[in-house]
Image (cartoon, grey):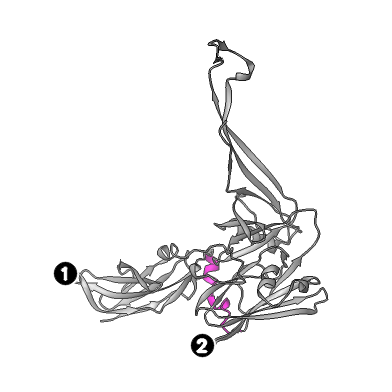
Amino acid sequence: MAITITSSPQNFTTASNPVVFEFSSTETAQDGFSFLVELTVNGSVHSYHQVFPESANFGKFDCSAILRTIVFSDLSTSGSYVEIYNNANASYSISVIDKYGTPPIEVGSWVSSSTLRVMNGSFRHADWIDYDYTNYDVTTFIDNDPLFLSLFPRTSQYFCGLTESAFVGFISTDTPVAVAVRIYDINGTQTAYDSTGITLPTSNIVLLNGSPQSIIDNTSIVASDFDDCYYYTLNVRATGAGGFSGNSEFWRIYLDNECSQYTSRRLHWLNKFGVWESYSFTKYSEESSSVNTFDYQKNQGVWSSTNSFDYGLVNGSSFSGTKTASDTMTVNTDWIKEEKHNWLMRSLLESPSVYLEITQGVFEPVRISTKKYTLKQKIKEGLIQEELTLSRTYSYQSQLS
């Protein structure tokens, strides 16, 4: 008699998509048969589950409903250059044993899966089917440079202002790594360089704040190095004790230092991989408030100190007890191409968590009030400008009248 785990999820799969193990047993014909599954999360036994065969001798166990409640992604407000994103991923494994008889009892030995990691991500079905974590693991040596954890179209230009945050994440299954910054002028000449070595826990998600100020605060690059900067690149290189080596893609960031009559509104949101994404709405924005009044009526007139009833004008009969104000903001993109527009609308509007950067490193949660978007087509559309409405999550309440 034997249990075999026939299929396991890939490493660093997304917790909000199916996380399915498949297994079989030679004993499924026994009376009262079921599989007993033990789920271990972050090194501790989490729960036990009874699973019945579904197809011949095979059964399956989907632990996504449990794992998606364990992983979460906090917005990084520490100002750190590199942050280990421990909460955004977790380790997990299963063990399976036969259970049968009258009454059913555990029979045989536990069979265990490999220990894997799951991250706080959620893909659309087609993207989930195509997802391969090794394309994003910077310690995996593949022909195509491993990617940062973003679906931002690489054919588009990514911008960041001098005083804005710029988050991007990556997967590392080995340690240590080095984060390299290269600054280029408008002629494409490299004018500054830094490589900062970082020791990481084996197998984790890492969030990088590649803003100019974060680079200045944490590397050998100084503020004056950005004076003639047209764009700069971020690149992660890994050569760890495990013998793996990899060199990530070069994430190119164009410095947005254009003088503008408009205030740039920088948004950060949780993307499909469970890390933070950033984009600036650089055109016209407008703030407005909706005021609600809670009124009450009272009888006309009051008794005066001389025991006469006074109907004086000053006494009134209709009053506002208190007022509340709810704030909204409309923001506009620059004129952008359809690939950037489609990425932005799908990624931002489908995100469960969005923040507005008030000043550098100071963030306020907002809700996207815009509910619908249309994916544009190049054959039909030229450059596109999109307007979104943001609802501020803090409302104002006046004092009592």
Instruction: Name the quadrant containing residue 400.
Output: top right
192 on left or right of 300:
right
| Foreground residue among 176 and 114 | 176
Q: Position of residue 32 (x, y in %)?
A: 21, 68
The kind of secondary structure element at disc 1 is: loop
Q: Position of residue 51 (x, y in %)?
A: 31, 68
Q: Position of residue 69 (x, y in %)?
A: 43, 62
Kindly tell me whether residue 28 is visible in this rendering. no
The residue carrying mark 2 is 242
352 on left or right of 92:
right
Image quarter (top left, top right, bottom left or bottom right) of the C terminus: top right
The kind of secondary structure element at disc 2 is: loop
Marked residue nearer the N-terminal end (2 or 1) = 1
Instruction: Name the quadrant containing residue 325.
Output: top right
Q: Residues within 10 Å of mark 2 (few under 14, many from 20)?
A: few
Amino acid type of disc 2?
Gly
Q: Residue furthest right?
A: 187
125 above or below 400? Answer: below
The residue carrying mark 1 is 102
208 on left or right of 380:
left
Q: CA distance from mark 2 to mark 1?
A: 49 Å
Amino acid type of disc 1?
Thr
Residue for point 57% across, 58% down = 351
Kindly tell me whether residue 23 is visible in this rendering. yes
Residue 139 painted magenta: yes
59 above or below 398? Answer: below
| Foreground residue among 58 and 364 | 364
Q: Residues within 10 Å of mark 1 (few under 14, many from 20)?
A: few
Residue for point 18% across, 71% down = 101
Q: Residue furthest left?
A: 102
Range covered by the magenta-colored residues: 125-142
Instruction: Name the quadrant containing residue 159.
Output: bottom right
